[in-house]
Image (cartoon, rainbow, N blue to C red):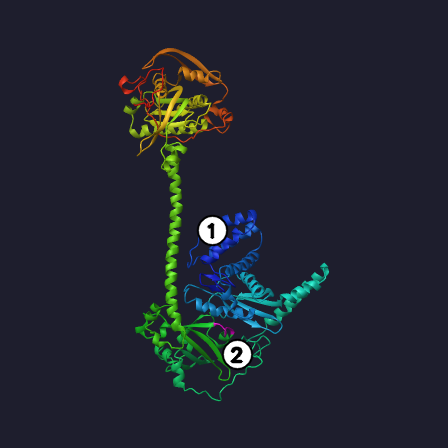
């Protein structure tokens, strides 16, 4: 599912791409580093594709495509340009991650660097079993150019390769590289649908490039001439190169890659190898010293095999079958022929036994895989495959019914198995830790959401500054407010409605009514203290003192009366009626209780406001004398009710609030067409969250409750230090 060109431990790659954790997180980091608003858009787009990626996890190719497509949209450039730009950045990322030393040791020049990519992939495949790397084949010439054959299982992402290769050449070898695609087709020699891209790579030392730039004319005509010449050269090379066939025994000026470049290097002028006239080793000894090797001719007939290959592949030499009938080539994915193998002669090959050729008793054990090097012996017209078992861990060694003693002591496969066993254990531990880390991240995210909900609920129960003090474990001191305005309301004949309806009908009616009232508290910036049954209590000027507390509560009361007309009585089907009472005076406010703390108001003002409600009339807003004086000459229409007997207070002259002369109904209700005029003149706003507080009067039948249901104080005189209305 993923493609790599060079992958180092930690799933980092150079020269290609893959769709695991590091690549996608690297893509997101690249997005974040883009300047300005484009970078912000890219970061948001990458987060929408997927929030995070796990190390050692293979992801679907569609994620890579989505990330690239989003980048194309935001940057308004082609996919080829995005891929090349990302390739350059990916090489920079590998260097910053500490892998530059490993990459520098792959070769002394760009050709050797690319030649060793497949070998490095073969080693890394021991740790990364799901790794699916591409293959490379290089054909070089004497004029500083070379052909890079690129084979991959996926289409469309090959443009990352030029970005990384050019960055490698510039940084490691001080060389400028120009890469162009000569051909792109489906490779018929490989099994399945495989992409085969041929790049023409032109190398030029950077100091030569700088000299050429210094001597070049600044005129646009010279630049155009140079570009035309380069295009003509590329066309000629394409026609010439694509007609060249490379076969065993036939050489062209595009020489096959070799492991040793004779006459080059620091020892090229002094060292001359000496070969014996005949081999001083017996065939039996050779097959024992190299227990895993195969020799086959051009017809694929097996001529020679190591003793352990014969042990684990019975009949390999005794029966007259070809090697392709016993083995299939896993990597590189080429057809089993001498010509195809020669094209990838410098790649490490992986052969796998065919199950149909194995004894029936061995069907349950894993197929044997051999990893090694193909060497063409031109004088014998034979190919030798020097190999070792491809095993990743001691568990695979046991499953294959093999032992370390089956591997030659000089073979490093022994060390690789033991070292990789430890590496796999570390990877599994790292995978588990990262999995737990991701789970903790998700839980932390959910915890933050739940914490937000808890805080919202807490702020709905207590004023924000009070709630914050309680969260910090501090004691909340009671506060005195010299003046505030308190409102009580209840539903007329609520007791009769309850007796005639189902409980769910009562709940629905109250919920509809309270939802409308709650919205109005935000419109007029008054503080909801509590609801008990059908009673609703709000206050203005507490917990944040404001001068316009009476006007705010008055406007809220007018809005309540309008909202009540929209709530139907479940018994009669007519709009419900409410009584509203308002009083202005001093109060003491504080938090009561530990288990379920409540923000309560204490003082005679609370009791008097409750009396205004209980002695009021249906659909009327009843005002006390102090409330009338607070609203007088403030733009409200108020009529005098007269003198009435107030329980526990004696005779009082009260008033009815009719309307606000300076505000429309839309402004009172806070509808979108207009704003409440009270907000314009106020800069200080109270904490608007509804909270718990003192109880309200029941008075559902329109009559004042008995004396014993309330603790009353004289209408005049000092406010008691503690007082809470009790229903």
Q: Position of residue 665 (x, y in %)?
A: 47, 23
User: Residue 189: x and y, percent?
Assistant: 49, 71
Tell me which corner region of the image, top left, top right, bottom left or bottom right, holds residue 509: top left
* In the image, residue 458 above or below residue 255: above
Residue at x 36% of width, y 63% of height: 425
In the image, 469: left or right of 381? left
| Label 1, residues with CA under 10 Å away: few <14, some 14-19, many ≥20 | some
Query: Which circle, 2 or 1, is nearer the viewer?
Result: 1
Residue 248, disc:
2
Q: Secondary structure at mark 1?
A: helix
- Which of the pair 587/121 is nearer the observer? 587
Q: Which label sits on residue 520?
A: none
Q: Earlier in the sequence, mark 2 or mark 1?
A: 1
Residue nearest the observer in this picture, 542 or 351: 542
Q: Does residue 73 appear in this view?
A: yes
Q: Check residue 344 for magenta coloring.
A: yes
Which residue is drawn at the image coordinates 29% and 18% (left, top)? 705
Q: Residue 263, position in %: x, y?
A: 58, 79
Q: Check whether the beta carbons of the residues at disc 2 and disc 1 lie within 8 A of each other.
A: no
Q: Which residues are magenta?
A: 343-347
**Vertical side of 81 occupied by 541: above or below:** above
The numbered disc on residue 49 is 1
Residues at marks 2 and 1, CA–CA distance in whole angstroms:
49 Å
């Amino acid at each position: 599912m993923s493609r790599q060109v060079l992958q180092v431990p930690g799933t980092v790659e150079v020269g290609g791409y893959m769709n695991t954790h590091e690549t996608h997180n690297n893509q997101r980091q690249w997005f974040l580093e883009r300047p300005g608003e484009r970078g912000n858009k890219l970061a948001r787009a990458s987060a929408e594709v997927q929030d995070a990626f796990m190390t050692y996890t293979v992801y679907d190719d569609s994620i890579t495509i989505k990330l690239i497509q989003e980048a194309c949209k935001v940057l308004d450039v082609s996919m080829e340009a995005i891929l090349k730009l990302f390739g350059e950045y990916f090489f920079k990322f590998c260097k910053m991650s500490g892998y530059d030393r490993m990459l520098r040791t792959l070769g002394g020049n760009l050709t050797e660097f690319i030649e060793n990519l497949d070998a490095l992939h073969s080693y890394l495949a021991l740790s990364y079993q799901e790794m699916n790397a591409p293959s490379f084949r290089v054909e070089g010439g004497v004029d500083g150019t070379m052909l890079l054959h690129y084979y991959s299982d996926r289409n469309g992402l090959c443009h990352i390769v030029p970005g990384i290769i050019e960055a490698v050449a510039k940084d490691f070898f001080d060389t400028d590289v120009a890469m162009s695609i000569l051909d792109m087709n489906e490779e018929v020699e490989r099994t399945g649908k495989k992409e085969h891209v041929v790049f023409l790579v032109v190398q030029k030392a950077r100091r030569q490039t700088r000299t050429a730039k210094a001597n070049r004319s600044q005129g646009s005509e010279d630049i155009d001439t140079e570009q035309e010449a380069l295009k003509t050269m590329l066309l000629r090379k394409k026609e010439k190169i694509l007609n060249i066939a490379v076969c065993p025994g036939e050489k062209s000026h595009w020489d096959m890659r070799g492991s040793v470049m004779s006459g080059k290097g620091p020892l090229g002028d002094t060292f001359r190898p000496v070969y014996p006239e005949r081999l001083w080793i017996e065939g039996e000894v050779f097959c024992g010293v190299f227990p895993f090797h195969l020799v086959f001719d051009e017809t694929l007939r097996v001529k020679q095999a190591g003793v352990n290959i014969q042990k684990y592949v019975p009949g390999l030499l005794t029966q007259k079958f070809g090697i392709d009938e016993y083995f299939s080539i896993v990597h590189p994915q080429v057809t089993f022929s001498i010509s195809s193998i020669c094209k990838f002669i410098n790649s490490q090959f992986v052969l796998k036994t065919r199950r149909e050729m194995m004894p029936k008793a061995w069907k349950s054990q894993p197929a044997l895989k051999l990893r090694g090097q193909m060497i063409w012996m031109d004088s014998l017209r034979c190919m030798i495959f020097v190999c070792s078992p491809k095993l990743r861990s001691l568990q695979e060694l046991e499953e294959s019914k093999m032992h370390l003693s089956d591997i030659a002591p000089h073979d490093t496969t022994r060390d690789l198995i033991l070292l990789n066993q430890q590496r796999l254990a570390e990877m599994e531990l790292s995978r588990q830790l990262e999995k737990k880390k991701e789970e903790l991240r998700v839980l932390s995210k959910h915890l933050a959401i739940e914490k937000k909900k808890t805080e919202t609920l807490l702020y709905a129960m207590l004023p924000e500054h009070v709630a914050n003090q309680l969260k910090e474990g501090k004691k909340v001191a009671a506060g005195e407010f010299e003046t505030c305005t308190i409102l009580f309301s209840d539903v007329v004949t609520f007791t009769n409605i309850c007796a005639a309806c189902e409980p769910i009908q009562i709940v629905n009616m109250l919920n509809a009514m309270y939802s409308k009232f709650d919205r109005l508290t935000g419109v007029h910036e008054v503080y909801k203290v509590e609801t008990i049954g059908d009673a609703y209590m709000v206050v203005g000027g507490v917990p944040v003192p404001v001068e316009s507390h009476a006007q705010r509560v008055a406007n809220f009361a007018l809005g309540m009366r309008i909202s009540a007309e929209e709530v139907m009585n479940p018994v009669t089907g007519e709009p419900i009626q409410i009584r509203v009472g308002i009083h202005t005076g001093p109060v003491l406010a504080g938090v009561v209780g530990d288990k379920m703390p409540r923000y309560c108001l204490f003082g005679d003002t609370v009791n008097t406001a409750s009396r205004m409600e209980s002695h009021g009339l249906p659909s009327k807003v009843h005002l006390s004398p102090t409330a009338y004086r607070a609203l007088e000459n403030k733009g409200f229409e108020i009529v005098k009710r007269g003198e009435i007997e107030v329980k526990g207070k004696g005779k009082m002259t009260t008033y009815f609030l009719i309307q606000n002369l300076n505000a429309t109904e839309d402004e009172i209700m806070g509808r979108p067409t207009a704003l409440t005029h009270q907000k314009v003149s106020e800069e200080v706003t109270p904490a608007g969250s509804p909270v718990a507080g003192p109880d309200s009067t029941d008075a559902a039948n329109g009559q004042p409750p008995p004396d014993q249901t309330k603790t009353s104080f004289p209408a005049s005189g000092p406010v008691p230090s503690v007082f809470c209305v009790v229903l």
